[in-house]
Image (cartoon, coloured by chain):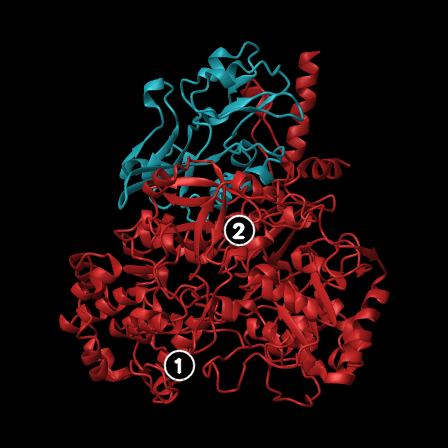
Chain colours: A cyan, B red
Amino acid sequence: MSAKRYAMAVDTRTCVGCTACVIACKTENDLPDGYARNWITEIATGTFPSLDLTIRSERCNHCDDAPCVAVCPTGASWIGPGGIVLVDPDKCTGCKACIAACPYDARFVDPRTGTVDKCTFCVHRVENGTPTTACQDICPTESIHFGDLNDSDSDIARVLRTREHYTLLPDAGTTPRHYYLK
Amino acid sequence: MRRREFIRISSYGLGGAALLGGVTTDWFHLYGGTLPNPLTNGDRVVPTFCELCFWKCGVLAHVKDGRVTKLQGNPKDPLSRGHLCPRGTGGTGLLYDPDRLKKPLVRVDRRGSQEFEEVSWDDALNVVAENFLKIKEEYGPEAVALFSHGYGGSWMNHLFRAWGSPNVAAPSYAQCRGPRDVAFDLTFGSGVGSPERTDIRNTKCLVLIGSHLGENMHNTQVQDFAHALRNDADLIVLDPRQSVAASKATHWLPVKPGSDLAILLAWMNVLVTEELYDREYLELYAYGFEQLRDHVKPFTPEWAYPRTGIEPELIRHTARMMGAARPATLIHPGRHVTWYGNDTQRLRAIAILNALLGSWGRMGGFYVPASVSIPPYEYPALEDEGLAPADKPSPSDYPLADEVLAQGVCDATIPGVRGVASIRAWMVYGTNLPSSLPEPAKTYEAIQALDFLVAVDVLPAEITGWADVVLPEATYLERCDEPFAPSYREPYVTVRQEVVPPMYDSKPGWWIARELGLKLGLPSFFPWKDAQEYAEARLKPLGFDCETLQREGIVMGERQPIYFEEGAVPTFWTDSGKIELYSQKLAAAGFDPMPTWHAEDIEDPPPGYYRLLFGRAPMHTFGRTTNNKLLLETGPENAVWVNTEVARAWGLKDGERIHLKNQDDVTSTFTAPVKVTERIRPDCVYVVHGFGHDTKKLRRAYGRGLNDSELVTRTKVDPIMGGTGMNVNFVTFVRPDAVADASEPDTVEGAVAEEVAS
């Protein structure tokens, strides 16, 4: 069995920032009121009428060099199947070291449990026969690509081969596996 | 200890995963931690269709232990294609809204005091029936009017047909899409329908006139919009605001509000003078090209420039783009188009541009829709058919209106507006009239004049607070409705099913209509025992397998040709049998037969005032969703978009809360934060419609953001069809400390949280 290497790419050309991804994640993962694992960022630049607007659906970057995993004192933050960065609630003490270490502000403490929560790339789906994440599945503009980078025929491998893309805060040295297509 | 706990949790995870349909990965031998599994998959998955807006997307509802856990798109459904917009995804926020209407209510104090007592359905319906019958005896059945919105309204429409009142109105006509439907009907002999017959998916050049697709989330259109972007289609957006769509455009034309028609005329001028139009198509199908050619001669891009603020070269360049892509050029007709009172003529201009480009009936333009024709249920013949509705001052007014004007029915309720009030009672189904009709003071005046008002709704709203009887309807996830067989690319039938039984003491619309019908002495119009029996009676003759329909949610009909080029027959149901560039019907009625520019149509804002524009946010459907816990998380309130220069002049800071005050000295009850942005022209401000509820019965929505409807105290009525142009109000900024009796919304969140927890 060859190891998988999951990654996600959001197409900023087609993403309209509708937040269906946010709501779908909340219901799929039964998240607490007032908290979300993903969010929309809008960046407007320029002066009227020469303007540029970038819209991104953002979440945990599932970094190859994940500072959250490195700083976790109990081993609760860990690298799961396919390189997905996960939190084991049984080991998490809620110390928030990972929240401070994450340059993407992707983590929060679930007030119901006192443990840290974040995007799981829907590991319960993708490792169990449903190949899509909930945000990808719902997306009306089909702007979210997800899959196994080690499979060169996968949609994610193809879009990253054919489309110009970038990652967030590359200088943070975290090597994200979440990409944005230009 | 830790090891034991670890194994226990892992096996729990595997047990849950088995529900997902087979699990093989041996997690805990390979990996070092517990894999999360939220276990939200249903033990039942029920197909139905959505009602968070009116697009009717196919939904798969997951039900676990009797509770709806999540909503997904039904991949078999042609409208959702497996995807949902945020509203549809958040439908459980409506189902489980603790503020829902739970019991039938009868008013116990003066109207509007919000004092009710809970009564049985039988008692509530008896009160309604007694009042309706009393009014019928004195004034005739037509003195009872129905306002409705939404698919469940079909049961009430049926009740009113049986009852014999022609005064059945929906604000979705004269306050929304009416001018578009009339204009396209005048031009092509048929309207654009809903879902619109726009072939966005295959277009090579999409032109949006104020349509903010992506913020306006009609699911399939937005899917197709993204598809067109992926196909590198040209996108031209005319909008005073850099909408999301404008941000993705090849060219954004930040047009001066109200001057859209000047651009449309200039585009016609370029297409005609540069001969970019589809000559063969026009020769075959169109009437009046010569007249149009001469008519548009003066409307050069240079003529349009001072009126619109758009450079002549950009007008020319974009017209050429449209010409180059034809017939796969789509000038989108939009949906909410009651803006300036000349709306039918503006929409006529859009229709004519499409005709010049040969896009009607062609791939990438407007397809020819097909539908499964479901035979109507056989009811007895109606008596008294052909009574005229009371919506017009005189029968010669608004001669081309083809639906009842909601504001006109409201006028006919107020003594003095049309002499003696001819409307004495209202039933209001699913529409919050103080926000869906303009001039709310008039709506309240009408309400006060009524003998009787009954409201049927899922949630309380301003209108239910003013009702004499409130009937709590079950949500779309708790009820069956009419089968839905839209005119679309491919014919199909879908059904709305009861996913979970109605909560509280709510009842489905079909039950309410039937029970009331029986009490009103109309049993022959309600021979079926429930909605399912009714649907089966209609679908069986077609040979439809109702079991498959219930299981899959969808049965497809046979695909038919949808483009002229693949065999769809060009048929134009106009007087001439052709596409009417020159409208004989408009000429005969005394209107401009071809759209033309009347400078007096557009008034500029007075100094210190800005034109109030309003629109949509992707996670909300007007005020109907602003109490939805899930949707409020991503769209908590509206903001007032103010151009950076204007904000600087007023000293307004981003995020600062302000009131808006209009030209008639009406100040918004609540405040909203200022959004200081370059993304809007300096002569207008923009807010999302649907916020600023002032009923405390909506505990989450109360006082969130400001209500634009309060500020629409002036309209310009379209003389052709009676649409109420609403973008004719001007507003200025008022700081909270300058408002004497500023309402500070109480915090009601805590109370809601408590109730949810219990």
Closest to the observer: A35 or B42? Answer: A35
Closest to the observer: B292 or B353? Answer: B292
Instruction: Residue B370 in the image: state x and y as whole percent.
Output: 46, 73
- Quadrant of the image containing the C terminus of chain B: top right
Write the residue at 65% across / 74% down. B157
Q: Is residue B136 above or below residue A27?
A: below
Image mark 1: chain: B
Write the residue at 34% across / 58% down. B257
* Outermost residue to the top: A73
Left-right relation of B539 to B344: right
Inspect the image, locate mark 1, and give the three-letter code of the amino acid beneath it: Gly
Q: Is residue B739 above or below residue B185?
A: above
Image mark 2: chain: B
Q: Quadrant of residue B586?
A: bottom left
The Cα–Cα distance between marks 2 and 1, rounded to whole angstroms, is 44 Å
Instruction: Residue B450 in the image: state x and y as whole percent.
Output: 71, 71
Any part of residue B5 in sight: yes
- Quadrant of the image containing the N terminus of chain B: top right
Find numbered disc 2 in the image and state the secondary structure of the residue it sits on.
loop
Inspect the image, locate mark 2, and give the three-letter code of the amino acid beneath it: Thr
Instruction: Residue B473 in the image: state x and y as whole percent.
Output: 72, 60
Find numbered disc 1 in the image and state the secondary structure of the residue it sits on.
loop
Disc number at residue B189?
Answer: 1
Question: Nearer the observer, disc 2 or disc 1?
Answer: 2
Closest to the observer: A75 or B180? Answer: B180
Disc number at residue B667?
Answer: 2
